[in-house]
Image (tube, grey):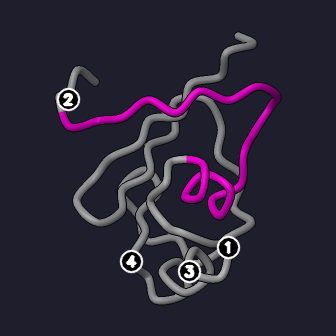
C-alpha cells in the first residue's frame, strides 16, 4: 500500500459513493462527467471495472481512474 502514486481520500462516515469520490478527488469536473466515465467502464474499484456510480466505497477500497489510484481512508476508524 505504500504506492507513491496513490492518493489518500479521507472520508467521515461509513462510505462514499463512487461518483462522489471522483468529484471529491477532482478526478472529474462534474457529476455528469463522473456518470459518463463510470458508465464507459473507465473506473476500477479494487481492480475490477465498476459501472455503478452509486457503488459504496469503504475504508481501504482502492479506486483507479485515468492512471491514478485513490485509497479510501475513514477518519472515524
Vertical placement of residue 69 versus 10, above or below: below
Q: Nearer the viewer, mark 4 or mark 3?
A: 3
Q: Which residue is mark 4?
A: 42
Which of label 1 and label 4 is nearer to you? 1
At mark 1, the secondary structure is helix
Closer to the chain start, of discs 4 and 3, is 3
Secondary structure of the residue carrying numbered label 4: loop
Q: Which residue is mark 3?
A: 33
Mark 3, other Cα within 10 Å: few <14 / some 14–19 / many ≥20:
some
What residue appears at the point 71 percent right and 55 percent down from the top-left corner? 17
How far apart are labels 1 and 3 at the CA level? 5 Å
**Residue 58 position in % (x across, y down):** 65, 37
Q: N-terminal of the two: label 1 or label 4?
A: 1
| Position of 77 relative to 40 (above/below) | above
Q: Earlier in the sequence, mark 3 or mark 2?
A: 2
The residue indicated by pointer 2 is 3
Whether label 3 touches label 2, CB < 8 Å: no
Q: In the structure shown, which secondary structural element does the residue marked by tag 2 occupy? A: loop
| Disc 4: CA contacts within 10 A as few (<14), some (14-19) or many (>=20) | some
> Could you say where residue 51 lies in the image, as x and y percent from the top left?
57, 78
Instruction: Tell me which label, 4 or 2, sits earlier in the chain.
Output: 2
C-alpha distance separating marks 2 and 1: 28 Å
Question: How far is mark 3 from mark 2, CA to CA?
Answer: 27 Å
Q: Residues within 10 Å of mark 1 (few under 14, many from 20)?
A: few
Residue 57 drawn above or below residue 42: above
Q: Residue 71 in the image: state x and y as whole percent.
A: 44, 35
Question: Which of pointers 3 and 2 indicates the residue nearer the eye?
Answer: 3
Q: Is residue 28 in the magenta section?
A: no
Asked if the residue under mark 3 is in contact with the one under mark 4, i.e. CB atoms within 8 Å, the reply is no
Quick one: 44 or 4, which is closer to the camera? 4
Magenta segment boundaries in residue numbering: 5-24
Amino acid at each position: 500500500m505504500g504506492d507513491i502514486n496513490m492518493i489518500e481520500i479521507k472520508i467521515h462516515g461509513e462510505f462514499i459513493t463512487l461518483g462522489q469520490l471522483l468529484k471529491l478527488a477532482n478526478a472529474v469536473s462534474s457529476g455528469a462527467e463522473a456518470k459518463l466515465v463510470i458508465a464507459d467502464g473507465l473506473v476500477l474499484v479494487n481492480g475490477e471495472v465498476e459501472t455503478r456510480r452509486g457503488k459504496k466505497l469503504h475504508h481501504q477500497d482502492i479506486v483507479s481512474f485515468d492512471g491514478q489510484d485513490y485509497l479510501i481512508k475513514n477518519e472515524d476508524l
